Structures are given as C-alpha cells and as structure tokens.
Image: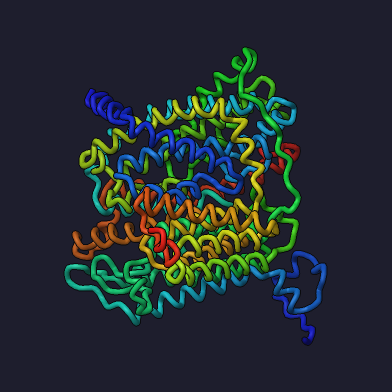
Amino acid sequence: MDTLHLLAGGLANALTLEHLLYAAVGVLLGTAIGVLPGIGPAMAVALLLPVTYAFEPTGAFIMFAGIYFGAMFGGSTTSILLNTPGESASVMAAIEGNPMAKQGRGAQALATAAIGHFIGGMVGVLGLVLLAPLVASVAVDIGAPDYFAIMVLAFVAVTGVLGASRVRGFAALALGLTIGLVGLDPISGQPRLTFGVPQLADGIDVVIVAVGLFAVGEALWVAAHLRRAPQEVIPVGRPWLGREDLKRTWKPWLRGPFIGFTFGAIPAGGAEMSTFMAYVTERRLSRHPERFGKGAIEGVAGPESAASASSAGTLATMLTLGLPTTAIAAVMLAAFQQFGIQPGPLLFTREPELVWTLIASLFVGLVLLLVLNLPLAPAWAKLLRIPRPYLYAGILFFACVGAYAVSGQPVDLLVLLVIGAVGFLMRRYGLPVLPAIIGVILGGDAELQLRRALQIADGDVTTLVSTPLSITVYTIVVLLFLVPPVARLVRRRRADQEPERVDAGV
Amino acid sequence: MTITDDRPAGHGAGGPEPTPTGRRAWLRAHSELGVSALLAAVGVLVVVDTLAESGAGTGSDPIGPRPVALVLGAALLLLAVLLTIDILRGGHGEAEGGEDVDLDTPMDLRTVGMLAGVLVATAVLIPLAGWPIAGTVLFAGATYALGSRAFPRDLVIAGAVSLSTWVIFDALLGVDLPGGPLMGVFG
C-alpha cells in the first residue's frame, strides 16, 4: 500500500516537463550510442557521465535509466542488422534476428525486439517495485560481516562463473582491486601505492577507470584490428508485426522477463546469462526447434524481453544492496557515488523521492522507448554506416572530455591512457573487463566492511562467519568454486555417451 | 641469435611446434607470458610499497592498512604463477571480438602507437592552447591515425565537434573546460 503511494508520488515527479525531457533525451542518446557499433551499454553510460554533472541527481539518474534501456535496445538493433554482436547480451539477437533480416524480415525482427524490450522492461520494473522495498527493509539489518560476505560473493560470482578461464578472471579482479587500492587508506589515512605523487592521494577516480577500460581500451583494441572492408548493413523499413508473428511471439515475450529479472538480479547473471537462458528455454519449448538458427522469431522475442527485464533486476540489486552485478550497474554505482549518494538498503529511507522518481521514470522511459524507436528504426539503421575513423576518434574524444571533466587536470588524460593500455592488454589476452571494474568499485568498500567488522569484534576473525546470512553466502561461494569443475566432469561423461549431442554453440 | 630448444617438457605433449625457429618464435607464441610478468611485477610493487609506505594497525583499527594490501599482493603473485602454468600447458586467453574487429589481421600496433601519441599531445595542449584547439588536434589526429585521409573535411569536422563540445559543456552544462587564448578573444 505504502509502496503504491510512494510510486504515485514518484510518477507525479517523473511526469514533470523537465524530467520527461531528461527521460526522452536519455532514451534517444542511449539508443543512438547503443546502435553505434563498438559501443556497448556500459561504455555508453561511462561516456555520458560528464553530461550529467550539470544536473541535480534525480535528473541525472532519470537520464541514466533512459540511456540504460535505450542502449540495451540499440545493441540488439546492431546485432540484427550487422550480425556481429558488440556485447555479449545481444549474441542471441544476432543468432535469430540476423537470419530474419537476411530473409527480408528485418522489420519484423526489430519490431519483435522493440516490443520485447518494452514488455520485458515493464514486467521487470514491476518486479523491482514489488521486491526492492522488501529486500531493502530486510537488508537494513544486515551488518558489516554480512556485507563483506556478499561482496566476496559478488567478486567470486562475476569472476568464476562467467568467462572461459578462471585464472584470467581472477587476474582481472586482482588488477582492479589494485587500482582501487591506490590512495589514502580511508580509516588510517595512510598512503598506499601513491609513490609520493600528490595527485594519487585521492585515488584514481572511478570515472577515469571506467572510461579508460571501456572506451579507450576498446578504441585502441579496435584500432589494432580495424576491419578495413566495410560491412554489409541490411536495409530495413518501418517495423511492424503481422497476426501470425504475434501469435508466435506473445508467449516468449511474457516468459522472458521472469528469466531475465532473476538472472539480472543475481551476481554473475547479467544480461548475457538472461538472454542465453531465455533462448534455450524458447528452443526447448518450441514445437519447431528445427526453425531455430534460421530466423525463428521466438528466439528474438524471448531473449529480448529477458534482456530488458534483466536490466530491471540488475537495478534492483544495485539500488537495494549497493551491489553491481553487471558492468553498466558498476558504472551507474560510480555515478551515484559521484553525487555523494550511496546505494544500499538505507537509500530507500534516506532518499525516497529520488528512488521512486527514478523507478517511475523507468516506466516512462520504456513507453518513450517504444513510441520513439518503432518509427525511428530506419534512421537508427543509418547510424551503422558511420565511417569508422570518425566513430573511434569520437569515442576517444569524449573519453578525454569525460576524464578531464572529473577534476580539470591534464595529468588525468595520461592516467586514462595508461588504464586504456591495460584495457587493451586485457582484450588482447582474454582477461574479462567486468571483474576488473567491479574490483575497482567494490574493493575499497569490501575492505571497509571487513575492517569495520573486525573493529566491532575486537579483531576476532570468527565474527566474519557469525551470522546465518554470512554462513549461507560463504556456502554459496564455495559451491561456485566447486560446481563448474564437477559440471564439466558430468558433461564430459555425458558427451561420451551420446557424442552427437552438441551444445548451443555460443 | 643461437638456436636453442629450451621449451619446457610439459609443452611437448601438444605435438611438435609448426615453426620451431628457436627462442624468438617460442616467445612470440607465448607472448601472453607478459601478462604473468605484469601480474608478478604489480604483486611485488604492492608488497614492497605496502611494507615501505604504510604502518601497522592500532587499537581501534586492529588490522590496519597493511594486511589487505599484502594479501592482494600475494594473490597477484600466486595468479602470476597459475597463469604461467596455464600458458605453458597450452592455455590461451581468447582475444575479444566485436563488430569492427577483424581478428584475422595481424595487430596494427602503429595505429595504436599513433593514437597514444595523440592522447599525450592532447594532454600537453590543453593547458597551453585550451580545449577547442586541443580537442581539434585530438579528433583530427585520431581520424588520421585510423586511416582517414580526407584532409580538409576531417579537420573541419574535428574543429566543429571540438568547438561545439566546448560550448555545450562549458557554457550550457557548466562543466569547466578551458577555452584557451583563442577563446579569450571571443569570450
């Protein structure tokens, strides 16, 4: 009841002309940047951070929410029309959407994606409305040992579950944690890894790290391997859906969000896992599994609605626990911190207006996304033809604007370049970027919680496993370590028995 | 360079190397060992710096600033060893793909170097010439490095992007970007 009241207040706030404008600008900017090849949602949010410095927090976050949803949708437009997905979340869109486009059904694929994002987002944000206050009210009581345990879980989950190589995942995490260590220790005030350089005493700003790893690292990496032959873009008309298509898509649209929200909310889920699970589910439930891989519209509808719902799930965890489960959430968390706002259970009691306006504007943003993107799709498709030198020069340019705007020091551009070089090496040698950025953002916090817990317990280490929640969480951590090798063993044994069975091949 | 076959025994299991031209080729095929070296170097740096820079804990802060950093340093060293073992056993980090990435071509480090140079030049130019000029150099330099040779057009676009960004950020959004001597005339 109370929730409804707060949401209504938030909606009234979100529907002011100013906030509507922010939402519209966010959706348009997000979609445009998401469509641009080579720019994923995380880079989009990182690059647009400086734009929001001028706004008050509510306006800035309304814009971010629009950018987030817009960029997710924009990413799938690219995969459908280009068949080389930029971010892992739109791999599934490429698998079915691109064959559809090649068969001349690009308009239907885009419409399926757009409506899927709308439905998935709506159901997902509804889930956020219902669950987030509940989680927040429970989480208010959790103490420092629990927080530390949850952060350890986040580190292990994003590192150990995703990605092919765990050694490389943990190497990326360790590098991120090291970057986060630079600066004065927040409790004792003693310098660490500053090498006597005064600029390093405040630590390396998270915005510079995010922009460096995502934007500069990516631009340098693409520059080293730039595709010289232009890619074929499939032309597309105004998106629409026929009756037959609707009959095939409405169930996947409704199934996707439940998968998406769940996997978006837990660490190591994210949009990648969500879309994958939704795809597998649709293929298994389909009466015509042979259509999959050749342009099955169900394979676009399910994953796309799951993708948007997973964004809502990600936001739920980020807002209620202060825990980023994806790279975009990590960058958004950094943005919150820039404004001096700490997401977590207390956010709902301390900043109710901000939170509920943000949630309400998610609904508004989704409506805008659908209304704007269906007619604009042909225009977005034109963005795919942008000459690559301009595109990557532009990314570097705005990366520098962002890094410079943080504190107005030219030295920051050199820091940006060094971190960009690290991002380059990580892409070259298969170190995942997500653990690194999570390490930078959560590392300091995790240490703070650890030391706070030990302060309270007078240095007694057993305090770390003194609560039921922390014990549960550590059990999950141990399981995460044990399950993949065991599963691999089982799969190998099963593969021996039926060798013709091939996995989804992603 | 003398040709010596000093491959570790564990590697031979994967079959003979296609081009056994000695140490150099081996190193090229195993350039990922550089990542191990980087991890080890960072690990040593963290440990040494922690022991040198920060002090022990106090009564109110029992563990102090040191242990977490030391654990991290040790973890980096351990990961360096584990990664080395993985690489020597034939493990490979998979290079990241993308819309504009063509992994079949060899790495074009010249372009990357030029871009890095452009970034450094921008950092130097900002305090001297202001954002509009530094930004123009950055954008035009980057497009040139990336292979565009449309001479007047690139420069015009670069100037337009840079100037409009400066106006939008400095004047409209209130994000402070230095205008430099040139903009002082107008402003």
| Quadrant assignment, res A220 | bottom right
Residue A318: where, in percent of width, then height? 36, 43
Q: Nearer the viewer, residue A131 or A453?
A: A131
Q: Quadrant of the C terminus of chain A?
A: top right
Q: Could you tell me if residue A68 is visible in this image? A: yes
The reply, left or right, for residue A195 in relation to residue A292 is left
Residue A271: where, in percent of width, then height? 51, 40
Number of numbered discs overlaid on the protein picture: 0
Q: Residue at x 30, y 50 (%)?
A: A339
Q: Nearer the viewer, residue B107 or A290?
A: B107
Q: Residue at x 69, y 56 (%)?
A: B150
Q: Nearer the viewer, residue B52 or A501?
A: B52
Q: Could you tell me if residue A214 is visible in this image? A: no
Q: Quadrant of the N terminus of chain A?
A: top left
Image height check: is B29 above or below A427? Answer: below
Image height check: is B52 above or below B125? Answer: below
The reply, left or right, for residue A169 in relation to residue A361 is right
Name the residue at the left extreme.
B59
Residue A89: where, in percent of width, then height? 56, 41
| Quadrant assignment, res A361 | top left
Image height check: is A372 above or below A28? Answer: above
The reply, left or right, for residue A448 in relation to residue A457 is right
Name the residue at the bottom extreme.
B2
Q: Residue at x 50, y 70 (%)?
A: B78
Q: Nearer the viewer, residue B97 or A233?
A: A233
